[in-house]
Image (cartoon, rainbow, N blue to C red):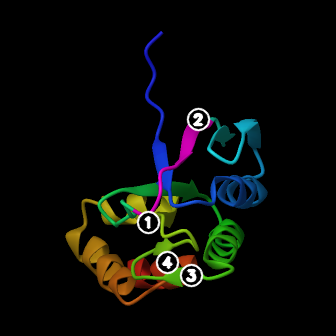
Amino acid sequence: MTSITPFLWFDNNVPEAVAFYTSVFPNAKVETVSDFMATFELEGQKFTAFNGGPGFRFNEAISFFIRVESQDEVDYFWSRLTAGGGAESRCGWLKDKFGLSWQVVPTVLGLYLSDPDRQKAGRVMQAMMKMQKIVISDLERAYAG
């Protein structure tokens, strides 16, 4: 069976990275881990991690999108993924301490942005553009006008 698995290139910290990611996601499991490489699963998505050295770095051209339902979930993933040296960005984007980019996005944002009422959608877009971490109550206020 054909499958697609993200392959993550780390400098020299695969065991630390796998321990970090599997501590953040409730539905996580490690298949194999060594000083050289690992295979693990987060929320049903398989990953392979490799210690390839400092030759390549993560950048924003690739990110992992976490769709959540509640503000509690936004807050949980935001605080856990930025912990220990991560960095907040804009519009629900962040980098974790390994430099990997994530988007923590509540489902309601997509619903509001795709509303046929372009004024409502526009207000939501403007509100989101001012945020780092997405705040659902602020989106709801913008949507309502």
Question: Disc 3 versus disc 1: distance between alpha carbons?
Answer: 11 Å
**Residue bearing mark 1:** 109
**Residue bearing mark 3:** 137
Q: How busy is the neighbourhood of tag 1: few (under 14 within 10 Å), some, or many (20 plus)?
A: many
Amino acid carrying mark 4 in the image: Glu
Q: Judge from the rendering whether residue 21 lies leftward or rightward of residue 105; answer left or right.
A: right
| Magenta portion: prevailing SS class | strand
Which one is in front in this view, the residue at disc 2 or the one at disc 4? 2
Q: How busy is the neighbourhood of tag 2: few (under 14 within 10 Å), some, or many (20 plus)?
A: some
Amino acid carrying mark 2 in the image: Lys
Q: Position of residue 73 (x, y in %)?
A: 68, 66
Q: Based on the picture, tell me whether residue 49 belongs to the magenta stretch.
A: yes
Residue depicted at x 52% and y 83%: 87
Query: Tag 2 or tag 3, which sits nearer the N-term?
Result: 2
Labels 4 and 3 touching (C-beta < 8 A): yes
Which one is in front in this view, the residue at disc 1 or the one at disc 4? 1
Labels 2 and 4 touching (C-beta < 8 A): no
